[in-house]
Image (spheres, rainbow, N blue to C red):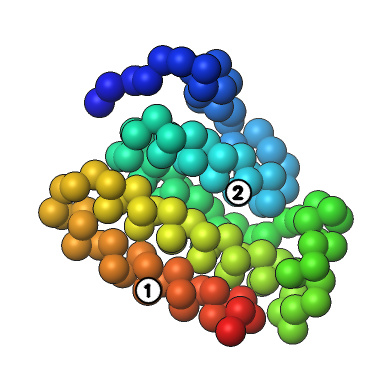
């Protein structure tokens, strides 16, 4: 792996210092971890991004969802048939599966390439469950 040094290197350094567990609501934990994972994708650290997105998915599965009032009032959550927490869970899982599939595809490794289609299918399934048609 090669680190790219440039304008974004300060951002990469700052993102690496984020401790996702320091945030006390699920939405902030997920948003910060996704931000970190996208930063890793930008730097072409595909294996790290894969790990980060996997941790996000595990956290969404295992934890009770807690949301800030601002997140709870997002139109996609507010106008849904689901509770805001369940809508958030499905939408974030869908986005994260898609990002993880992309990072796995970018590695070019056959063992990860085999799992890309599963991630994309899970993403579509979660978007459908969240109410998107």
- Reply above or below: 101 against 18: below
Q: What residue did someone put label 1 on? A: 121
Q: Residue 92, image x and y in percent?
A: 58, 60
- Reply above or below: 70 against 74: above
| Element marked by disc 2 | helix
- The residue under the point 48% across, 57% down is 96
Q: What's the distance in space between the residues labelled 1 and 2, CA to CA?
A: 21 Å
Q: Residue 21, image x and y in percent?
A: 60, 38
Sequence-wise, the earlier of marks 1 and 2 is 2
Q: Residue 32, image x and y in percent?
A: 61, 40
98 with respect to 90 (left or right): left
Crowd tier of the residue under label 2, counting other residues whose Cα lies within 10 Å: few below 14, some 14–19, many 20 or above: many
- Quadrant of residue 23 within the rendered picture: top right
24 with respect to 21 (left or right): right
Q: What residue did someone put label 2 on? A: 30
| Element marked by disc 1 | helix
């Amino acid at each position: 792996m090669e680190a790219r040094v440039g304008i974004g290197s300060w951002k990469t350094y700052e993102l690496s210092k984020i401790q996702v567990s320091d945030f006390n609501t699920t939405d902030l934990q997920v948003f910060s971890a996704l931000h970190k994972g996208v930063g890793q994708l930008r730097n072409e650290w595909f294996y790290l991004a894969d790990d980060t997105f996997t941790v996000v998915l595990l956290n969404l599965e295992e934890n009770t969802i807690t949301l800030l009032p601002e997140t709870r009032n997002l139109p996609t959550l507010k106008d849904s048939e689901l509770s805001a927490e369940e809508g958030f869970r499905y939408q974030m899982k869908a986005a994260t599966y898609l990002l993880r599939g992309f990072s796995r595809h970018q590695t070019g490794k056959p063992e990860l390439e085999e799992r890309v289609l599963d991630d994309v299918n899970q993403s579509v399934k979660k978007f459908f469950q969240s109410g998107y048609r």
